[in-house]
């Protein structure tokens, strides 16, 4: 039997596929199909590369519950995209993918309203501060900013890799968590670095023995709110830049989302942690070396 979450994602996939098919057929009838492919081939075919990154990032996020922003940020920095454009592009694309995930969790009643409120309000504040800071620093101190973000993604890669070797924790005792501080830090880091909410916030909630379904569901809804806030802030400060990156990430994520949930039970989690952690570490290390030297 197909779960409600998978059914919702499949419906979203079919609607998106139908819209894309109608769009392509319309372009063909109007004689603009060649021009469309020419536009998509700009900037060394980056649209198609981002489509692939969006697919891979959504598979990771759908199976591990985190990692979309980390994968996208690491890849875009590796491709020498400016830090402010990296975060702006990722949050613009994620506004749609996190909206779909949030609706799924709300329908499945995986969301605690009080937990969302306590996380989202400080996260919004952190997201605005992070976006404005990156807009300024990204323009004038791009090399320093890129190096700092690369070191952060390197740290996240090490954390992801270490998850493959962690023993199961005793979750009988629920640790006290400062949700305001956690939301504020998560919102700032995610907005400034282009990702990191999942490993920091969702990971902390689960580690501190919050019920996993409510931790993931509530964190996803709060993530959508901060993502939308960050995207709007970037639009007002930077305008819409690198639409080909946004479109590639968005389409890759939407196409893959219905099937990532199905893959969750089939993919070896330990192997995923090892593969993704190693990949992020290697790419971040190369970016750090290129930035420093």
Image (cartoon, grey):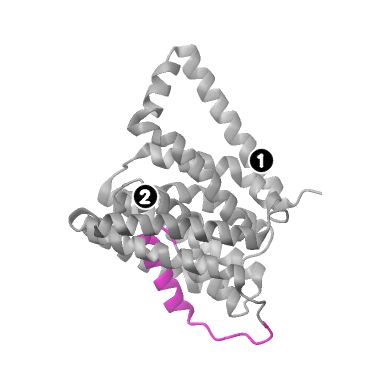
Q: Which residue is mark 1?
A: 11
Residue 173 is a magenta residue: yes
Q: Which residue is mark 2?
A: 78
| Label 2 SS | helix
State whether residue 85 is above or below residue 47. Answer: below
| Label 1 SS | helix
| Picture quadrant where residue 241 is located | top left
In this view, the residue in front, 190 or 142, is 142
Q: Label 2 neighbourhood size at 10 Å, few (<14), some (14-19), many (20+)? A: some
Q: Residue furthest left?
A: 140
State whether residue 259 is above or below residue 284. Answer: above
In this view, the residue in front, 162 or 212, is 162
Residue at 45 percent of width and 60 percent of height: 281
**Quarter holding the C terminus?**
bottom left
Residue at 45 percent of width and 13 percent of height: 30
Residue at 57 percent of width and 25 percent of height: 21
Estimate the x, y position of residue 197 in percent, counting from the top left: 47, 65
Camera-nearest label, 1 or 2? 2
Estimate the x, y position of residue 84 in percent, counting from the top left: 30, 53
Give the distance between the C-alpha atoms of the residues marked 1 and 2, in whole angstroms: 34 Å
Residue 236 is a magenta residue: no
Q: Is residue 1 visible?
A: yes
| Magenta part of the chain | 170-195
């Amino acid at each position: 039997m197909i779960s409600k979450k998978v059914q919702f994602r499949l419906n979203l996939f079919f609607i998106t596929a139908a819209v894309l098919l109608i769009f392509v057929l319309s372009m063909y009838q109007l004689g603009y199909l060649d021009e469309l492919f020419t536009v998509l081939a700009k900037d060394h075919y980056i649209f198609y590369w981002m489509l692939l990154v969006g697919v891979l990032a959504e598979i990771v996020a759908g199976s591990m519950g985190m990692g979309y922003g980390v994968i996208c940020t690491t890849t875009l920095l590796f491709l020498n995209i400016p830090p402010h454009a990296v975060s702006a592009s990722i949050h613009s694309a994620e506004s749609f993918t996190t909206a779909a995930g949030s609706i799924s969790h709300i329908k499945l009643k995986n969301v605690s309203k009080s937990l969302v409120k306590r996380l989202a309000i400080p996260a919004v504040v952190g997201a605005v501060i992070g976006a404005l800071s990156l807009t300024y620093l990204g323009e004038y101190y791009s090399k320093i900013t890129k190096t700092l973000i690369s070191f952060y993604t390197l740290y996240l890669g090490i954390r992801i890799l270490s998850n493959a070797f962690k023993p199961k924790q005793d979750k009988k005792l629920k640790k006290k968590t400062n949700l305001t501080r956690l939301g504020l830090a998560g919102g700032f880091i995610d907005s400034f670095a282009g990702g990191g909410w999942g490993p920091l916030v969702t990971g902390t909630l689960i580690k501190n023995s919050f019920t996993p379904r409510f931790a993931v569901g509530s964190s996803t809804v709060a993530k959508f709110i901060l993502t939308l806030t960050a995207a709007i802030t970037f639009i007002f400060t930077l305008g819409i830049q690198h639409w080909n990156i946004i479109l590639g990430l968005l389409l890759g994520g939407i196409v893959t989302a219905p099937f990532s949930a199905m893959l969750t039970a089939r993919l070896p989690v330990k192997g995923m942690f090892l593969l993704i952690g190693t990949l992020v570490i290697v790419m971040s290390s190369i970016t750090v070396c290129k930035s420093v030297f």
